[in-house]
Image (spheres, grey):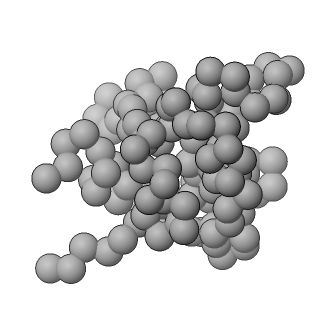
Amino acid sequence: MIQQVSALEACAIFEAIQPYLRIQPYRRDSGARKVRHRIEFYGVPRELIIRAIAATMPCVSCGDPIHPFRVRKTGRDHRMPEDHHGFYFACACPLDKRIACSRTAAAAQEYEAVVRRLGPDRP
């Protein structure tokens, strides 16, 4: 059986950013039977964050071009994360553009593929 490459792995910058990847369970948004994961990056050099934020790929749901590497917006502070926290990967349109894309089966399958292929329990 051939394993399909995830959209994250297909990003041109993936090789450079992979060492900083951390897949973490996000219990606050998980159900009793299904754990949601955050695909985060920690300790990324500022220059690499800038390159990653400029990267584009098609949304896995609608196909529109998106910037999959994003800085998490917390409160009123939308600056580059000084401690490099809040830098993450998203495979669908930003919520302020098209919230439906992040709720599709295609998005769920992509996140599951990333966790399965790149998570801490990978073979």
Residue at the extreme right = 76
Please report the residue visible at 38 percent of the width from the left and 31 percent of the height from the top.
Answer: 25
Viewer-side residue, 101 vs 9 = 9
Q: Quadrant of the N terminus?
A: bottom left
Is residue 8 found left or right of 98 in the rendered image?
A: left
Q: Could you tell me how many numbered marks the image carries?
A: 0
Is residue 31 found left or right of 82 in the rendered image?
A: left
Viewer-side residue, 63 vs 77 = 77
Viewer-side residue, 106 vs 69 = 69
Viewer-side residue, 122 vs 53 = 53
Res 36 seen here: no
Residue at the extreme bottom = 2
Res 43 seen here: yes
Q: Quadrant of residue 12?
A: bottom right
Please report the residue visible at 43 percent of the width from the left and 64 percent of the height from the top.
Answer: 9
Please report the residue visible at 63 percent of the width from the left and 69 percent of the height from the top.
Answer: 57
Query: Residue 88 appears at what percent x and percent y?
Result: 57, 41
Please report the residue visible at 61 percent of the width from the left and 28 percent of the height from the top.
Answer: 84
Is residue 57 found left or right of 40 in the rendered image?
A: right
Query: Residue 63 appears at what percent x and percent y?
Result: 66, 75
Is residue 80 found left or right of 31 in the rendered image?
A: right
Q: Is residue 32 above or below residue 36?
A: above
Query: Residue 109 appears at what percent x and percent y?
Result: 41, 61
Query: Residue 42 appears at what percent x and percent y?
Result: 50, 31
Q: Is residue 123 above or below residue 55?
A: above
